Image (cartoon, rainbow, N blue to C red):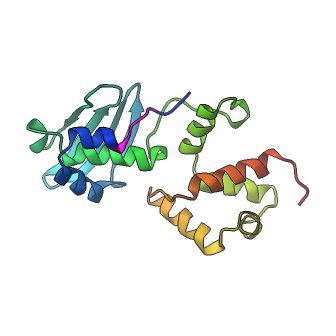
Amino acid sequence: MKLLKLTEDQLRNICTPINLQRAENYVGKFFDCKIQDNIIVGKIKGNHGVYNVSLKIDSDPLEYSCECKTSKEMFCKHAAALGLTYIYTPWVFETDEKIERDSIKTLDELSFYLKTTKLKTLIDELRKKGVGVAKLSDLIGVSLQQIAAILKDEEKDKYHVLTDSIKLACLYILEKDFEV
């Protein structure tokens, strides 16, 4: 089980620089995001209503659809924004594929689990085992304020560079049966 691969280079190859720049304003503002086979879909409020946007990830060039006027002529900022949202915050995309932590056997499965599991979920599990955020903070060398900011960003579907590292630390602590 692995996430569909999408890169900023793929988006740059099909999108104009100005549309890619404009797309950044829409990152994280999608709703009803899903992964369906090799297609990511989402909805975004645009200037003229809500647009349904989709990207077929495994095609070259990327295939897309959007209900905005620009998309009939070129790869629009909404399609680019959907791609960027997927790259930066893949956990906002619902998928029928789930993986249980105890069945992870490959690095791809671990990556999939990290990208589809919220940090808050792992921290809540740690709390149930008696490991508070302060202890986690001491163990990993990330301040309580940073962890709080990362959790707040996660609520807004924003990605922080430390998120996956903190998730890995949480997983390690959860997997070991440490005395508290």
Q: Is residue 14 above or below residue 45?
A: above
The quarter holding residue 39 reads top left
Q: Position of residue 93 (x, y in %)?
A: 43, 41
Number of dots carrying numbers: 0
Residue 11 in percent (x, y) is at 28, 41
Q: Residue at x 75, y 65 (%)?
A: 132
Left or right: 9, with 35 as reference point: left
Rendered residue at 44%/32% (across/down): 4
Which residue is pictured at 27% across the width and 31% down the height? 62
The residue at the point 26 percent across, 43 percent down is 12
Q: Quadrant of the N terminus?
A: top right
> Which quadrant holds the C terminus?
bottom right
Residue furthest right in the image: 179
Main SS type for the magenta part? loop
The residue segment tinted magenta is: 4-8
Name the image quarter holding residue 143. Answer: bottom right
Q: Position of residue 70 (x, y in %)?
A: 10, 44
Q: Nearer the viewer, residue 2 or 123?
A: 2
| Nearer to me, 129 or 170 | 170
Indicate left or right for 64 with 130 as reference.
left
| Of the pair 49 and 79, the residue shown nearer to us | 79
**In the displayed structure, does residue 96 sit left or right of residue 99?**
left
Q: Does residue 5 belong to the magenta stretch?
A: yes
